[in-house]
């Protein structure tokens, strides 16, 4: 005699994991590309290995090259073996690979999408994927328009009743505000905002997610998180790599568009935002948008006072000689594209009045690292003045990558009969404290998109506000280029960037 | 002290330290902290002393000391700790207490920096075994959580002072000789607790992969309604490991609002329908198969021979049969402990499940 039918799965209660996403088919456009091989497939395999994927899932690779399912799977296996966080287990890979297939078509051939629709219906019937579709635009951005248009024309953007269709859009979301608006309009011709997931993989990193917990779950920090106690904030993203085969894209983009518009402004938002009303996606994104709207616009001459752009010249990285940017393959020899940018940004609101945010990002810098450093104000120079000791300010560092963690610098007395004050560091490492590997950002983000949780994805207004800020800088740069500073590869950037922060009586942190 | 274990050199790759049992450097019990200080002063700059928890292992089995030290080493590699290994023999004719100190160092990341945890080993014979609370209290790293892995049957009466200090009490019900009695002690600990102590049964921790996989099988909207049509259950357990199967059944019963029938071989649904279950003795892992019959539908979860994977099978009329390979988690004791230590919070479903299976344990 059956009891009343259940409305939710009661077995989920108490498990540390979230509810498994609905069965679905993930269609990857640009399935033979680097992103698919290095990030998406390893992330999907890791989700499968953690038992986080639903039993009924299909992955369809959509690309132009001619190949069989078998060849496609073999290529993906090689990539997964190389890039997966967890080592590949043959049995699990076999099980996962059985859900992967390949669909060959030109992106601009409508028939290819009609064939895809038929294939997805067959997969629904064969694998029980229930008509749920997640389209991942991992192709080159110049293909987005044609893909989205064909998805719309073929009706793939519309889900059957009781099913869903979503789209994940990879960055860059345009190259400026008009193109971002154009892309957003294009996406929304096919998918409405609730179906659209703009991926910024920085938001999927554990440490980025931890910023809110650090700030709003620890009374010792939040009480001091304002202009009364904080002197300035430094946000850094450095890498020793050059353009590495991305010259075609990068020479048009530059560091400001490639990194600041998305990743670094997102980190700034998480650092500067007010406590959200709730943990739902829109409450958090509303607060981030408020920060972007509070950014003091940098226009005209202010750009040249508060923004330093640089380009790497020849130098050495890890003891090896490397070429100047202008000598890289496929780079215009007269290029004025910035490979380094340092900005002094002000958030004009009550909390942050008078607290500059210094942002720097660059290629061919000595080491790789992304961090947010909160520099607290100095203690009054009274008590220890007579001893002649200089006291370093307290600095709270949130390391986003690598070696995710948090450290706090403070002053301590050195053992001994005399009074000597030295800075000491308290360090928290994710790896040693929690004893388990942190999932890759793409794992979290793919799972969120499958589950319909947009919290860690950028909303349209966030993207457009960020472009508005960045476009004003580009507009000023377009008037002249004599401000472009050069720095040797392997150095920490141009001297002008040091002067930018020296004006605030500070120096860039040594990573 | 075994210096190669205590202070390995960079490049030793001591991520897993294999040792035959050597407790380390013998020390006077009253001078342990001082000797530990000397140990660290003599180490080089590549080693960092770290501690995030107090991890105490209590055993009365002298044969397990080597294995216990290996487990401590594995735990220290992921959770830097002050480890205290206590080997007690309360029945020894002569009363004696001895102590040793050593360290476990693990390479951190790709560099040469090593994170080192210290271990204090005690041997408590005869009456000295009653000094256990004092030994524990006087050698804890202050302010850090205390995790006690109790590798013996729980004594009665319980020393409330000792248990009151424990933040996380770890035990393994699958090793108990008299589970009915031991579970009743656990129930007492649980019901009398006012300190927020977490009770961690490693056999329950092992069942996490089972529960996770089973929840996944019923996640889909077309599957979970079957849970209200369960007609019977069948499990395969290793001989003598019936409690493992019962714990899983207790969990299912708690989730589906079933009560024990009093017959010892069935549960009753809220409307009084009997759900019979059968536990077959099959040599092998503690638990190897669960079949859930829901009318015409059959849901099966079977542990692969290797023990690394589950095969989940769903057969339901009118739909395509589904088969999936799912991770079964690692079965080594160190992995189970690490999994438990990585998880925060209490196990409310464990105590609920326990309540439901207590009437079945003696049957």
Image (cartoon, grey):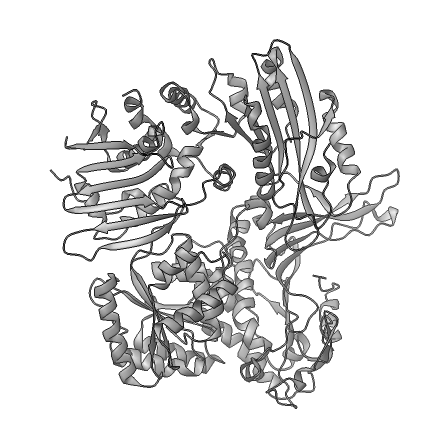
Specify whether residue A300 is in view. yes
Residue lying at the far front in this picture: please name it: B283
Q: Residue at x 69, y 23 (%)?
A: B99
Report the front residue among A32 and B165.
Answer: A32
**Quadrant of the frame with the C terminus of chain A:** bottom right
Report the front residue among B328 and A243.
Answer: B328
Is B303 above or below relative to A203? above
Tell me residue A158's x, y (percent). 25, 72
Residue lying at the far top in this picture: please name it: B93
* Quarter of image, res A500: bottom right
Specify whether residue A290 is in view. no
Q: Is residue B172 left or right of residue A188?
A: right
**Quadrant of the frame with the N terminus of chain A:** top left
Is B186 above or below relative to A135? above
* Quarter of image, res B321: bottom left
Tell me residue A395's x, y (percent). 68, 53
Report the front residue among B272 and A508.
Answer: B272
């Amino acid at each position: 005699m059956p009891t009343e039918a259940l409305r939710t799965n009661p077995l989920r209660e108490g498990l540390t994991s979230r509810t498994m996403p609905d069965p679905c088919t993930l269609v990857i456009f640009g399935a033979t590309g680097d992103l698919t091989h290095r990030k998406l497939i390893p992330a999907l395999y890791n989700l499968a290995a953690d038992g986080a994927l639903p039993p009924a899932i299909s992955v369809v690779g959509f690309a132009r090259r001619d190949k069989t399912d078998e060849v496609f799977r073999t290529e993906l296996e090689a990539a997964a073996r190389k890039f997966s966080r967890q080592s590949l287990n043959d049995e699990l890979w076999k099980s996962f690979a059985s859900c992967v297939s390949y669909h060959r078509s030109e992106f601009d051939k409508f028939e290819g999408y009609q064939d895809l629709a038929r294939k997805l219906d067959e997969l629904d019937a064969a694998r029980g994927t229930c008509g749920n579709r997640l389209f991942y635009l991992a192709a080159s951005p110049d293909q987005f328009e044609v893909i989205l248009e064909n998805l719309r024309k073929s009706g793939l953007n519309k889900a059957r009743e009781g099913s869903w269709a979503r789209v994940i859009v990879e960055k860059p979301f345009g190259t400026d505000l008009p193109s971002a608006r154009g892309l957003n309009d294009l996406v929304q011709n096919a998918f409405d905002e609730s179906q659209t997931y703009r991926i910024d993989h920085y938001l999927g990193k554990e440490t980025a997610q931890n910023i809110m917990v650090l700030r709003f779950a620890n009374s010792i920090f939040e009480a001091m998180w304002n202009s009364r106690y904080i002197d300035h904030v430094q946000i850094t993203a450095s890498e020793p790599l050059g353009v590495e085969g991305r010259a075609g894209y990068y020479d048009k983009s530059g560091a400001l568009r490639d990194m600041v518009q998305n990743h670094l402004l997102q980190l700034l938002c998480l650092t500067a935002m007010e406590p959200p009303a709730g943990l739902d996606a829109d409450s958090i994104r509303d607060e981030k948008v408020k920060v972007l709207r509070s950014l003091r616009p940098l226009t005209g001459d202010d750009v040249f006072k508060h923004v330093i752009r640089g380009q790497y010249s020849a130098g050495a990285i890890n003891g090896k000689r490397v070429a100047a940017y202008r000598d890289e393959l496929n780079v215009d020899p007269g290029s004025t594209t910035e490979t380094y940018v340092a900005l002094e940004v002000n958030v004009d609101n009550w909390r942050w009045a008078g607290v500059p945010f210094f942002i720097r990002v660059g290629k061919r810098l000595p080491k790789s690292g992304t961090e947010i450093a909160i520099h607290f104000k100095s203690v009054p120079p009274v008590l220890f003045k007579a001893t002649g000791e200089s006291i370093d300010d307290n600095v709270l560092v949130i390391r986003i990558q690598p070696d995710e963690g948090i450290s706090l610098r403070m002053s301590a007395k050195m053992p001994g009969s005399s009074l000597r004050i030295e800075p000491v560091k308290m360090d928290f490492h994710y790896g040693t404290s929690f004893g388990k590997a942190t999932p890759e950002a793409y794992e979290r983000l793919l799972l969120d998109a499958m589950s319909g949780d947009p919290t860690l994805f950028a909303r349209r207004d966030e993207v457009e506000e960020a472009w508005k800020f960045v476009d004003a800088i580009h507009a000023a740069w377009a008037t002249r280029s004599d401000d472009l500073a050069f720095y040797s590869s392997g150095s920490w950037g141009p001297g002008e960037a040091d002067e930018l922060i020296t004006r605030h009586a500070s120096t860039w942190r040594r990573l | 002290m075994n210096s190669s274990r205590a202070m390995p050199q960079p490049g030793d790759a001591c991520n897993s330290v294999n040792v035959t049992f050597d407790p380390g450097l013998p020390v006077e019990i009253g001078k342990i902290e001082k000797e530990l200080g000397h140990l660290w002063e003599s180490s080089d700059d590549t080693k960092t002393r770290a501690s995030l928890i107090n991890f105490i292992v209590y055993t009365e089995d002298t044969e397990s000391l080597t294995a216990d030290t290996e487990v401590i080493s594995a735990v220290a590699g992921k959770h830097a700790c002050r480890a205290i290994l206590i080997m007690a023999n309360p029945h020894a004719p002569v009363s004696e207490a001895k102590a040793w100190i050593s360290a476990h160092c693990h390479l951190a990341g790709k560099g040469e920096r090593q994170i080192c945890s210290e271990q204090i080993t005690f041997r408590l014979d005869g009456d000295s075994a009653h000094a256990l609370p004092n030994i524990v209290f006087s050698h804890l790293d202050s302010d850090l959580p205390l995790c006690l892995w109790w590798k013996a049957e729980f004594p009665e009466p319980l020393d409330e002072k000792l248990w009151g200090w424990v933040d996380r009490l770890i035990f393994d019900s699958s090793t108990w000789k008299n589970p009915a009695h031991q579970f009743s002690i656990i129930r007492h600990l649980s019901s009398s607790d006012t300190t927020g102590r977490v009770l961690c049964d490693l056999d329950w921790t092992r069942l996490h992969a089972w529960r996770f996989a089973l929840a996944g099988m019923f996640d889909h909207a077309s599957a979970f309604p079957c849970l209200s049509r369960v007609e019977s259950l069948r499990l395969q357990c290793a001989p003598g490991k019936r409690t493992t199967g019962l714990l899983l059944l207790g969990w299912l019963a708690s989730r589906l609002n079933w009560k024990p029938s009093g017959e010892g071989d069935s549960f009753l649904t809220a409307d009084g329908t009997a759900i019979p279950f059968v536990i077959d003795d099959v040599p092998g892992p503690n638990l190897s198969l669960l079949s859930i019959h829901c009318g015409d539908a059959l849901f099966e979860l079977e542990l692969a021979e290797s023990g690394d994977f589950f095969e989940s099978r769903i057969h339901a009329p009118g739909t395509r049969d589904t088969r999936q390979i799912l991770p079964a988690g690692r079965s080594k004791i160190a992995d189970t402990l690490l999994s438990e230590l990585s998880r925060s919070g209490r196990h409310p479903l464990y105590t609920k499940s326990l309540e439901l299976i207590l009437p079945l344990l003696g049957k």
